[in-house]
Amino acid sequence: MWIYEKKLQFPINIKKPDARLAKIMLEQYGGPDGELGASLRYLSQKFTMVTPEAKATLNDIATEEFAHSEMMATIFHQLTQGLTKEQIINSGLDAYYVNHGLGVYPVSAAGVPFSACAFQSKGDPITDLYEDMAAEQKARSTYEYLIDLTDDPDVLAPLRFLREREVVHFQRFGEALDIARDYLNQQHYFFMNKYGCDD
């Protein structure tokens, strides 16, 4: 289980509103490779992991990804504070605004609503852990692309933090994959009650 601390995992204090940046930041909140999808993917997959270590890894990372969803929502929220009508229109954020105002809603940067169709839970630990490693690499790439598109130090700092966490998660899933594979490659013996089922 986990305890929620009423603070972000990394401090966010954006001073300058930017509608263009806000729009693209939505990608890592509600996009197909974003934090919301990651948290739900890992939380769903943990139930069919074959070792306690693999289950714990997925549970731990899933809860951290929820914290990252909160961070991305905070970035979006802070980037939209004080926007003018012209800034909203000129950035292309107007279609989003018509549907959600400046509320936080899980969509991609292109405006596609979040869908669980973006991830899988196959029930096979090896398949799922490979998907998880790929998901972390896709998220790392997305953070790098977002970093390329801003010079605002208040936005860059949390993005760099989040990018590094994707690298760590990739490594942890690799460790979980090794543990699960070793377990599945062992011979397992199952013993029945020596007195039989009727006694």
Image (cartoon, helix red, strand yellow):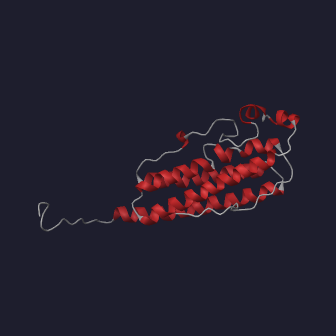
Residue 173 visible in the picture: no
Q: Residue at x 73, y 46 (%)?
A: 25
The count of marks equals 0
**Taking 148 as reference, is 199 above or below it?**
below
Q: Nearer the viewer, residue 73 or 110?
A: 73
Q: Residue at x 86, y 34 (%)?
A: 85
46 lies left or right of 28: left
Which quadrant of the figure has residue 86?
A: top right
Q: Nearer the viewer, residue 48 or 11?
A: 11
Residue 68 visible in the picture: yes
Question: Going by the picture, which residue comes out furthest to the bottom?
Answer: 194
Q: Residue at x 67, y 40 (%)?
A: 108
Q: Position of residue 93 (x, y in %)?
A: 78, 36
**Taking 116 as reference, is 55 above or below it?**
below
**Taking 103 as reference, is 147 above or below it?**
below
Which quadrant of the figure has residue 116?
A: top right
Locate the C terminus and report the quarter of the image it occupies. Answer: bottom left
Q: Position of residue 130 (x, y in %)?
A: 49, 54
